[in-house]
Image: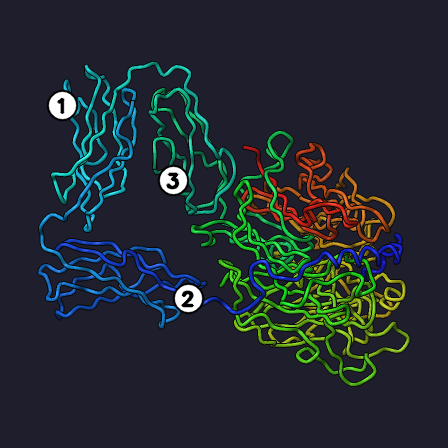
Amino acid sequence: MERAQRQRGRRTMCVVAAFFVTFVAGCGGSSTTSGGGGSPPIGVTVTPVTATVVVGKTQMFTATVSNDSANKGVTWALSCATANGCGSVSATSSASGTAVTYAAPATTPNPATVTIAATSVSDGTKSASATITIGSSAPPAGVSVTLSQTTATVAVNATTTFTATVTGDPSNEGVTWTLAGAECGGATCGGLSAATSASGTPIVYTAPGVAPSPPIVTLTATSVADTTKSAIAMITISTASAGGVSVTISSSVGGFVVGQVATLTATVTNDTGAGVTWTASSGTVTPVTATTAKFTAPNSPGSGITVTATSKADTTKSATATFGITDLLGVTTYHNDGSRDGVNNQEYVLTTSNVKSGTFGKLFSCAADGALFAQPLWVPNVNIGGGVHNVIVAATMRDSVFVFDADANPCVTYWHQTLIPTGETYGNWNDVGNDDIYPDIGILGTPVIDPSTNNIFVVTKTKTNATTYHQRIHALGMATGAEASGGPVDITATNVTSTGNCEGGSTMVFDPLWENQRPGLAIANGVVYVAWASHGDTAVWHGWVVGFNTSNLNISSVWNDTLIAVSGEIGCRGGIWMSGGAPAVDKDNNLYVLTGNGAFDGVGSFGDSFVKLTTPVLNVSDYFTPFNENTMQSTDADLGSSGTSVLFDQTAGPSLMIGGSKNGVIYVVDRANMGHHNTTTDMVVQEWTADGKSFSTPAFWNNTLYYFGIQFGTSHQGEMFPFDTGMGMFTTTPSASTTSLFRFTGATPSISASSPTTDGIVWALETGSHGTDHGAALAGPAVLHAFDATNIGTELWNSSTVPSDAAGNAVKFTVPTIANGKVYVPTRGNDDTEGGGTIFGEVDVYGLIP
């Protein structure tokens, strides 16, 4: 287990104890947003609540539903005293915030009132209504018209936008537009994009090619409902020179998700208000004002999509923004997917040519309340914060979950849930007598998100005192952070048990204090799987795996990897920690874990083994255990230090899995015939000893394994090992190594690419300054590295070169997330782990510099 790390010294316990007293005295346990209670009630409102609609005319109504996490919206119904005389509604149902149109009947009912009601689909007991008065065809009283601008200067052939707002017009009949001038008429006064418009809908005025004399044009907007009411704007046609015009676009680089809608803004100097014309190489761009537009990304992914804004005052001046469009559905689990290969093959912004100093760097940071051991997760197109946004989910060691906007600079926090019940607080290293995880103990394993519901599953660790701990699994709705699926569920000795003699009896139970929820969570067959190990090999623990149904968090199955004590071996143990890796999942929903030091007999105990488990009922269907497992556990060289096996399928030949160990051996195993245990030789496809011990999950891309091992007490290089598809074997001599060195704990590399073979970049975090396991050493910045995936001897960029690119202080075993043109790095902020600092956790965001 992680106790091998203690070779590098211990903090003086009396000093730590004194620090702990001071630290705890300053800690609070209250929830910032909620304490993990039930979901807030649904509410429905309708706007407007009253309206007068002339016979044969229409009126729009909107229902807004609060706390409707499934966004099921409402159903609409009409009622009045006259049968079949209520009018009609354009739709019988609508989403929250989506308007429907009511059409009044041709004759007035008696009495002349109609009720329109909206009822929540999610909760039929919740509804709201509006009262409609059916009026005669006489013009409504009190009509008035106002214009968005009453004076404007427009260059010849240039454009500007006008919007008419009509009050006292319940049927929203809008306005008609006309142009006139002392010395112009018709087209010589200019042109309009529309002769009529609804209230609040903009129209575009285009100036004539030759200015009239005098150069004044009058634009009139007249109410359709009451033609005696109007508003005018005086337009001056300018012939001034457009010299010196320049154009820039606010977002000149970056990425969008297919179909995503975004606002682009052009800044134009010296154009006399003429604005710009927008064009796009793909997708659509719709002008909103003279200098803003809505860009709708194309429905197909790709790179090099351009949007151009051209000055209308000087068409030789323009600016172009270049975007990548991704169809990535999300990074919703540790190391990208169930295969744990760490690859995003749908990255169309970042390339080996633009990730370099001057064009790539740190964009912004999002502050959290504690260190982030868990990998940030990325989800596109979430209906949140009053719109549709891409988001980042971050979990902290102070039992909080944050949802940030993935793209907004400066950072936007949509919600923050602190999952600590009243009377409890997050855990502390001193309670388990081990400083491998320091100083806080909260959410340690990377959460998992169910893509079908966008619910976030996460396990917290809290305490009422130093010996009474709780672990709970939560399901949080993405939109608000409200508890879902009946959560939270307390994970206790009552609901997690197994038979076995490892604790001196016939039954073994889960202990929330000593069990360390170190691995990332996994989903398969509608079940969330959670695994545990120890806190630095202290007290009694087991390698538990527990399945929780995603729909209600009921426990579906429990598996304990060490049921039977074995004579001559060091207890049962067998923790599943994998340096923070998550169980792998194959296409048939089998689960794969690597276990640590513990009892082994191949029947009920599987210490130091690759184990294949069936789902949803957890049973061992196959396994591999090295021939020297007894020596491995006695020398603390456990197999389970490696992140869970990377799975990959050959075009021809066996389906393989790859994993390492503390002794530096890399094993390649046939998943259909894993080899079990042989006392003299390993029955595997291949194995070799790398020049570095494994405390990480390797990556696999383009038939190449990327492995960043370590040597205790020294820095070490990352290595790449090609896979010979003809031989079905790896080349065991690295084809390239990094020039940059990595200290303990090495690195878990991740890959971004635009396809399985092109634009590959290897991203790795150097976290040697993580500030734990090193006595009194202070934490220092993590360093993000980018290497050419075809030859990692070529380093493209790293965050230590330019001071403004520096990341927050390092957290060991952390993994960057790469998505949609950005790299998200989890850190502990400026906290130095020894009492210094003001920011105790943050996500640092890197991308192309605008």
Amino acid marked by disc 2 = Ile
Colouring rule applied to residues: rainbow
Residue drawn at 61 percent across, 54 percent down: 394
Residue 784 drawn at (x, y percent)? 69, 42
Which residue carries the number 1 mark?
Answer: 185
- Left or right: where does residue 118 sit relative to residue 56? right
Q: Residue 441, located in which quarter of the rendered image?
A: bottom right
Which mark sits nearer the N-terminus, 2 or 1? Answer: 2
Q: Which of 698 and 98 is in front in this view?
A: 98
Which residue carries the number 3 mark?
Answer: 294
Amino acid marked by disc 3 = Lys
Q: Which mark is residue 42?
A: 2
Q: Mark 3 Cα within 10 Å, few/some/many (few <14, many 20+)? A: some
Q: Nearer the viewer, residue 307 or 844?
A: 844
Amino acid marked by disc 1 = Gly
78 up-or-down from 605: above or below: above
Q: Residue 845 carries which label?
A: none
